[in-house]
């Protein structure tokens, strides 16, 4: 596994783990990597310092790489990730998943052709633009994938 510091087109820096450099390249090309702060998929590697493990001394305890515990940006990013995870759990518990039919279902609800209910799913940029042009209210949320750390 390899960790990269990444930067989105909005300037947010975040960390992501990959199997290898080729896995990063494939995911970047497919726009599968989203900014941990804003969800943008326009990301690239950010300059980073190498992480080199230190040899352990018997009574010195375990050596740790650079700690982000006192880094306000890292702390805020962690808070945002937690809030987005909480939001995802709330949406999944309280809304109906309609998958790629989101735009179609949102229209039916808006035009009273279907029962009014909370839904979530996927919409293309074009579909989202059309919904907005029609005055249909919805929100786009950066959907963080579930990962074990």
Image: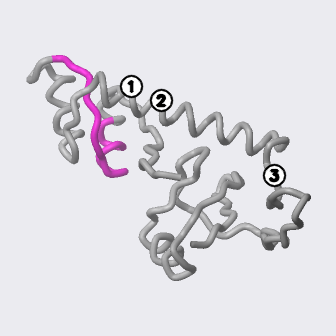
Could you say where residue 139 lies in the image, as x and y percent from the top left? 41, 32
Q: Nearer the viewer, residue 26 or 49?
A: 49
Could you say where residue 140 lies in the image, as x and y percent from the top left? 42, 38
Disc 1 to disc 2, how far (Cα)? 6 Å
Query: Which label number is shown at residue 67?
Result: 3
Magenta stretch contains residue 20: no
Disc 1 to disc 3, how far (Cα)? 31 Å
Q: Residue at x 61, y 44 (%)?
A: 37
Q: Nearer the viewer, residue 5 or 43?
A: 5
Could you say where residue 130 lies in the image, as x and y percent from the top left? 30, 42
Judging by the rendered image, the residue that carries numbered circle 1 is: 90
Q: Residue at x 52, y 55 (%)?
A: 34
Position of residue 85 relative to residue 63, above or below, is above
Which comes sooner in the sequence, label 1 or label 3?
Answer: 3
Highlighted range, magenta: 116-131
- Asked whether the residues under the numbered discs 2 and 3 touch, taking CB atoms below 8 Å apart as contact, a structural biologist would say no
Could you say where residue 135 lies in the image, as x and y percent from the top left? 33, 27
Local crowd size for mark 1, using a 10 Å CA cut-off: few (<14), some (14–19), many (≥20): few
Q: Quadrant of residue 77?
A: top right
- In terms of secondary structure, where does tag 1 sit? helix
Image depth: mark 2 or mark 3 in front: 3
- In terms of secondary structure, where does tag 2 sit? helix
**Quadrant in which the N terminus is drawn:** bottom right
Local crowd size for mark 2, using a 10 Å CA cut-off: few (<14), some (14–19), many (≥20): few
Q: Residue at x 47, y 43 (%)?
A: 142
Disc 2 to disc 3, how far (Cα)? 25 Å
């Amino acid at each position: 596994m390899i960790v990269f510091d990444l930067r989105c087109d909005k300037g947010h820096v975040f960390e992501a783990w990959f199997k290898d450099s080729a896995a990063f390249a494939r995911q970047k090309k497919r726009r599968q990597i989203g900014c941990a702060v804003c969800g943008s998929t326009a990301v690239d590697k950010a300059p980073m310092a190498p992480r080199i493990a230190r040899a352990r001394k018997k009574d010195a305890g375990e050596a740790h790489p650079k700690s982000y515990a006192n880094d306000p940006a890292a702390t805020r990013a962690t808070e945002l990730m937690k809030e987005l995870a909480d939001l995802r759990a709330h949406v999944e518990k309280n809304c109906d998943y309609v998958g790629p039919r989101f735009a179609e279902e949102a229209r039916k609800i808006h035009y009273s052709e279907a029962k009014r209910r909370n839904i979530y799913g996927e919409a293309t940029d074009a579909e989202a633009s059309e919904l907005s042009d029609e005055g249909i209210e919805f929100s786009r949320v950066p959907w963080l994938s579930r990962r074990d750390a």
